[in-house]
Amino acid sequence: MTFEEIKELRNHTNPFANGLGMVITEIQEGYARVEVPIQGSMENAAHSVHGGLMYTLCDAACGAAAASYQYKVTTVDSSFHYLRPAIECKMLYAIAKEVKHGKRIMVYDVELFDEKDTLLCKGIFSMMQLKFPLTAE
């Protein structure tokens, strides 16, 4: 399976990410970029993007990067830091880069930016490679 095929598969078979409008725009071995356009319903009472969406976008980027090895994956742990609020944003994107690729556990560094390339969040996620290969189900 090519990286383009992995990207298309993941973009079309993830109902949760699709419902939020998240799209994988780049994927390579151990690397992914995921974007989401911001809608008013994604804001919290302070009129900034909800922290749960920011975390979810980073989780999706790490999952896509881990899936670049053509296996289904799941998150097992994370450490996440909100550095700045996402106020008046039109789009957010997360970039995940592999730190370590083990037999089953992979570790990813992830950063979240707005459309002005302002760093908003930073985290590290551990992903587990499951025994199920990616397939076009």
Image (tube, rainbow, N blue to C red):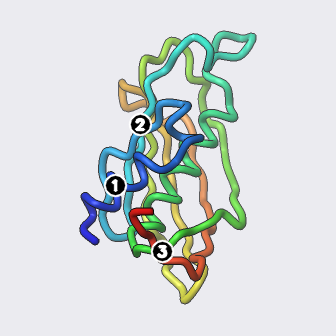
Which secondary structure, mark 1? helix
- Residue 3: which quarter of the image? bottom left
* Residue 32: x %, y % from top left: 38, 55
Q: Tell me the CA gap for discs 1 and 2.
A: 13 Å
Q: Amino acid at mark 3?
A: Tyr
Front tag of 2 and 3: 3
> As drawn, is 2 to the left or to the right of 42?
left
Q: What is the count of numbered marks?
A: 3
Q: Nearer the N terminus, badge 1 or badge 2?
A: 1
* Residue 28: x %, y % from top left: 30, 64
Which secondary structure, mark 2? strand
Q: Amino acid at mark 1?
A: Lys
Tell me the crowding category of disc 2: few under 14, some 14 to 19, or many 20 or more residues within 10 angstroms, Cα based.
many
Tell me the crowding category of disc 3: few under 14, some 14 to 19, or many 20 or more residues within 10 angstroms, Cα based.
some
Q: Kindly identify which numbered label has been placed on residue 96.
A: none
In this figure, which residue is indicated by the disc labeled 3? Answer: 71
- Residue drawn where x is 40% and y is 75% of the image: 69
Tell me the crowding category of disc 1: few under 14, some 14 to 19, or many 20 or more residues within 10 angstroms, Cα based.
many
In this figure, which residue is indicated by the disc labeled 1? Answer: 7
Q: Nearer the viewer, residue 28 or 8?
A: 8
Q: Nearer the N terminus, badge 2 or badge 3?
A: 2
| Up-down relation of residue 46 to residue 24 (above or below) | above
Q: Tell me the CA gap for discs 1 and 3.
A: 13 Å
Position of the N terminus by quadrant: bottom left
In this figure, which residue is indicated by the disc labeled 2? Answer: 35
Toward the bottom, the furthest residue is 103
